[in-house]
Image: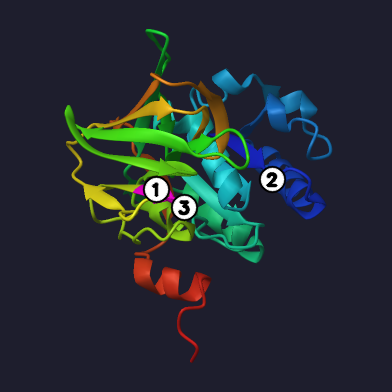
Amino acid sequence: MSNVGIVVLHDRPLAANLAADVIHWLEDHGHDVRVPVSDAAVAEGIPARAVPDDEFARGLDVAVSVGGDGTMLRTFGLVSRCGVPILGINMGRLGYLTAVQPAQWQESVTRVLAGDYGIEERMTIDVQRLAAGNATEPRTALNDAVVEKQAAGHTVRVAVSLSGQRAISYAADGLIVSTPTGSTAYNLSAGGPVLSPDIQALVVSPVAAHSLFGRSLVVGPEEVVRVEVEAGTAVLGVDGGHSGLLRAGDVVECRVSEHPARFVTFGERDFWRVITAKFGLDPR
């Protein structure tokens, strides 16, 4: 018997229906199933399996994400500190992080429960906000931390220091600190470089920089990236979730986490082939 967690894409009935099918199949085969309470009303018939979000990962053997990349990020946020492997079933549009398509779910879940799978680890970052002399509990991000202007029509000025050495300041709409996995997300949209997940590095990219130098910085895994708000007000986002308001003098620190993301795989995934297919880079 295994303990399996299910996380479901919200506002998409097909995802909820598939999640219900997975849950019923697992229970029919004698496995314990749970969902985070934030998903309890999404799939029909599963509220009784709901547990508080902060208890979801305890004792789990595997977490199944039924959705797209956003659902994978949310699943990671729920299980990151416990090292639970994540199986992604793609019910989204891009599905860059997911391993299997909906028609393959039963075969894939069966293989996972039999131990017939591999694990791909991805580097993550711990993000900590220091405001008014107080430090928040670090949040672990798979994709990125974003310091972004609060008001339209304004910019925010931020100073970037690397391991205590001031490096550069930007007046911009925002600043992204991304992992190699996150390099294909907001960082890519902002003109930053795409990094292979085999590279251990962080990317620091300004968003719409109001300066002659608006380039990204690629820094090593031992560097601590410190972002200080020098002027203006900003909001901090961690993997797309709001994590607080920032004022002048407030600081965000990003460093490589000791808790990598652990994705279920079936055979080796070719990163560049996935990128080429998902983003339509090869017209042939």
Q: In this view, does 165 lie above or below 119?
A: above
Q: Please, what secondary structure does the residue beneath circle 1 have?
A: strand
176 or 239, nearer to the observer: 176
Which numbered disc, 1 or 2, marks the residue that appears first in the sequence? 2
User: In which quadrant is the N terminus drawn?
Assistant: top right
- State which quadrant residue 227 falls in: top left
Magenta span? 205-209
Rate crowding at label 1 as few (under 14), some (14 to 19) or many (20 or more) other CA atoms within 10 Å.
Answer: many
- Was residue 207 drawn as part of the magenta stretch in this picture? yes
Residue flagged by tag 1: what amino acid is it? Answer: Pro
**Residue drawn 58% across the image and 63% down it:** 94
The amino acid type found where label 3 is placed reads Ala
Q: Work out whether residue 62 can be spotted.
A: no
> Which residue was labeled with disc 3?
208
Query: Which mark identifies residue 206?
Result: 1
Residue 9's mark?
Answer: 2
Q: Position of residue 167 (x, y in %)?
A: 20, 38
Against 173, residue 245 (above or below) is above
Mark pair 3, 2: CA separation = 31 Å
Task: Decide which of 107, 152 is in the foreground and name it.
Answer: 152
The reply, left or right, for residue 218 in relation to residue 101 is left
